[in-house]
Amino acid sequence: MRQGILVRYGEVGLKGQLRGHFEKALQKEILRATGVDPRAVRRTSGRIWIWPEEGKIPEVLRAVTRVFGVVSASPVLEVEAEWEAILQGALRVAQRVRARGARTFKVEARRSGKSFPMTSPEIAREAGGVLARELHWPVDIHAPEATVTIEVREKAYVFSEVVPGPGGLPQGTGGKGMLLLSGGIDSPVAGWLAARRGLFPIPVYFHTPPFTTVWSWEKVKDIVEVLAGWMGPLPLYTVPFTAISQGIFAKGPERLGTILMRRFMVRVAGKLAEREGAGALITGENLGQVASQTLESMAAVEEASPLMILRPLLTWDKAEITAKAREIGTYPISIRPYLDCCNVFLPRHPVTRPSLEEVLRAEAQLPVADWVEEALQQVERKEIAPPLG
Ligand code: ATP
Ligand code: MG
């Protein structure tokens, strides 16, 4: 008898080569996240089994249910495919769930192959009867509070607890994107959602000291750390943005300030994307949230971008974004009250429907290429590790 973890993954639509690629990437991510010995991980019949060292089950279970691509995981007991051993295993698992307060239960059974002498319904009925008697536990076939599952193959497996994972696709299967990360609530969620589809987000923060302080940077770094807890170490790019912001507000029409700043951001991020081999930019923009997030404003910014801009949150409601931020763990950091450059350099009367011509005219007065080049020369890249524990 041994204890392990059964990992389920989805995306059944993935076929052929794509599926093999997905499975390899998933296995690699599981090894990274759990730190278990590669020999302790096996893949059979569309599922992954982990057999960690004694006592490590809770830790490994926690880690594996944060891996993108994992639909759910269960602590599982492996026993010999013999009736007595199966009953003993089922009792052990059942006792644990029962102790947690489930008032009713049922047994589900699956048998693959015909070598075991009982059919699946027989296994379920017989084992259910034994558990009910031994534990004085009422069976409820239709709406049980717990389900004890028995699977009989070469060996037999018993489990009950099913812990959901984030789903999605494994890290790296969708390439890389530069994540414009501001320290607000939205952009970390946007990065997480991209990552969940396998698009590895590389955070870029535009920093405007002394208007934004070291605490603003710390805040962004802490957010990246939480994201790294989901996806492993992440590089954080910090771009000094004070000179550009001041230049824009000194030379351009104030009401276009935010849009002009954003156009510089996407240009710089586009250049960093070349260095990193990233194929897109990702922002936390959300339709209609502020003046700079109308269709016209977004179009006026996008026109300056060498890459497509992905906006995973475009159509989300604020309450949905906030709920997701809490789930991911970035929310408490995002609401720390430090300033972002876009709040410091905020036009008093921003345009909501800029015309591209007007924007281009204003920008023609600015030394665009020089400013981008200067900013790029001062960029810093720092590897951010996941939080400990
Ligand atoms: P967030 O909560 O992500 O800060 P927001 O609702 O405050 O978003 P804006 O401040 O208008 O919206 O920013 C829109 C998007 O522009 C952000 O989601 C982010 O992707 C990008 N952005 C804004 N400021 C910065 C910055 N200082 N550094 C990097 N990206 C930024
Ligand atoms: Mg913001």
Image: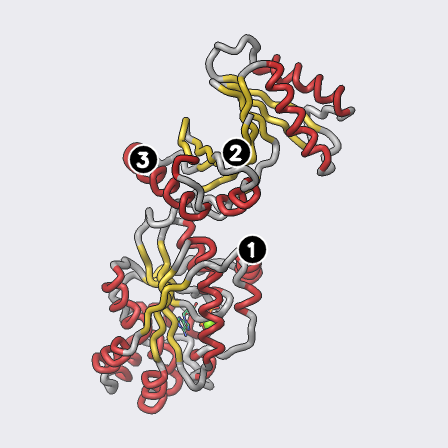
**Amino acid tagged 3:** Gly
Residue under pointer 2: 4
**Amino acid tagged 1:** Glu
Q: Tag 2 or tag 3, which sits nearer the N-term? A: 2
In x, y percent, where is residue 96?
68, 33
Between tags 2 and 1, which lies in front? 2
Outermost residue toward the bottom? 250
Instruction: Name the element at disc 1.
Output: helix
Residue under pointer 3: 20
Residue under pointer 1: 327
Query: Could you classify mark 2 by the number of other residues whose Cα lies within 10 Å: few (under 14), some (14-19), or many (20 or more)?
Result: many
For the question of whether residue 211 can be seen, the reply is yes
* Quarter of the figure with the N terminus: top right
Reply above or below: 125 against 36: above
**Amino acid tagged 2:** Gly
Instruction: Name the element at disc 2.
Output: strand
Query: Could you classify mark 1 by the number of other residues whose Cα lies within 10 Å: few (under 14), some (14-19), or many (20 or more)?
Result: few
Distance (Cα) linking label 3 and label 1 = 30 Å
Q: Residue at x 41, y 79 (%)?
A: 351
Reply above or below: 136 against 295: above
Reply above or below: 324 against 306: above
Distance (Cα) linking label 3 and label 2 = 24 Å
In x, y percent, where is residue 374?
25, 81
For the question of whether residue 360 can be seen, the reply is no
The front one of 296 and 176 is 176
In x, y percent, where is residue 242?
36, 84
Q: Are marks 3 and 2 in contact (CB under 8 Å)?
A: no
Q: Residue at x 46, y 14 (%)?
A: 113
Q: Tag 1 or tag 2, which sits nearer the N-term? A: 2
In x, y percent, where is residue 110?
54, 20
Q: Tag 1 or tag 3, which sits nearer the N-term? A: 3
Q: Are marks 2 and 1 in contact (CB under 8 Å)?
A: no
